[in-house]
Amino acid sequence: MKAWFAPAKLNLTLRVGPPQMDGRHPLDSLVCFTRRLGDHLFVEAAPDLQLEISGPFGKGLSAGPDNLVCRAAQILADASVLPPKANIRLVKNLPIASGIGGGSADAAAVMHALNDFWELKLPLANLVALGAQLGADVPACLTGQPVHMTGTGETLAHTGPLAAMGVVLVNPGVACPTGPVYRAYDALGAGPALDVQSVPNVSDRESLLAYLREVPNDLEKAAIRLVPEIAEAMASLAASPNVRFVRMSGSGATCFALYDDEETAQAGKNFVLKGLANRGFWVEADHI
């Protein structure tokens, strides 16, 4: 049975404009993906649409029609005028409500999987247009490549190669749902209208790091107010040896640190694990 990979999404930068009339926020974000850390998804024949969820973060998740995976499958079936028939097995390895696009990545993975399984042969552009109905992160997750995300997530520009770096992800084990973070951001006084600029060449480490230092994650302050443990995660990463950059991803609560290579990132992971021992924090290393 073919496996489909749903990698963790990292918002390396995230500018957020004031809400529009429809309540959605304009975004300006450089997005990339992990290489190994992620959920896995399998599809097989079934008489109707079924979802089975397992894995370390699968407990308590709804497998009903409200799950983003089921919604993605239904949207794809409706657009193709097909009855949604498939058994989907989702292995949840990523924390939920954590700012690394787990649900969005799963939705993107099932759209790719069913496009193949149902032999629809829809081009990526069609999948992206459908995915935009599900959430701001789904279009970027469908590409699976570094992109500059603008609009409300639906406008994507490929950045070209991104500098390879080691990364450590830390989640404090506290859910940080997107909606409350955006509401807290608005309450703090949403920033001015976005002045979107194209992403420069970030194919080497120093250029990438310089760009990240210049462009913030606007949601950090609001998220930390709701989940103070985010600040602790960032402080632990910042204290790790040979760290190059630390930031929160998306709306939180997952934070990440960048290192020159994966070996250095692994040392950073060990340092953070030692400092946060028995605290229930999720800590993993990978590369981008």
Image (cartoon, rainbow, N blue to C red):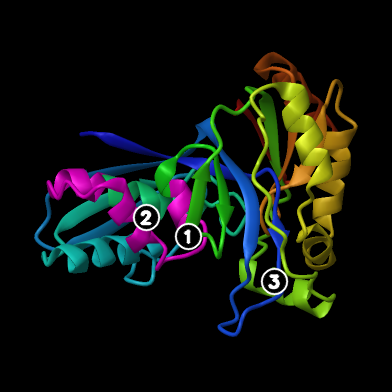
CB-based contact (under 8 Å), mark 2 and mark 1:
yes
Q: Earlier in the sequence, mark 2 or mark 1?
A: 2
Q: Is residue 279 in view?
A: no
Q: Which region shows up in magenta?
A: 113-141
Q: Is residue 6 in view?
A: yes
How far apart are labels 3 and 2 at the CA level? Answer: 24 Å
Amino acid type, residue under disc 2 in the picture: Val
Q: Which residue is the site of mark 2?
A: 128
- In the picture, measured across the screen, residue 15 lies left or right of residue 145, that is right
User: At x 70% / y 21%, what residue is drawn?
Assistant: 266
Q: Earlier in the sequence, mark 1 or mark 3?
A: 1
Say which of 254 and 20 sits in front. 20
User: At x 59% / y 49%, what residue is drawn?
Assistant: 100
Task: Give the label on residue 182, or none.
Answer: 3
Q: Is residue 229 magenta?
A: no
Place residue 67 in its image quadrant.
Answer: bottom left
User: At x 64% / y 51%, what residue is drawn?
Assistant: 29
Q: Residue furthest top?
A: 263
Q: Position of residue 82 (x, y in %)?
A: 11, 64
Task: Give the label on residue 154, or none.
Answer: 1
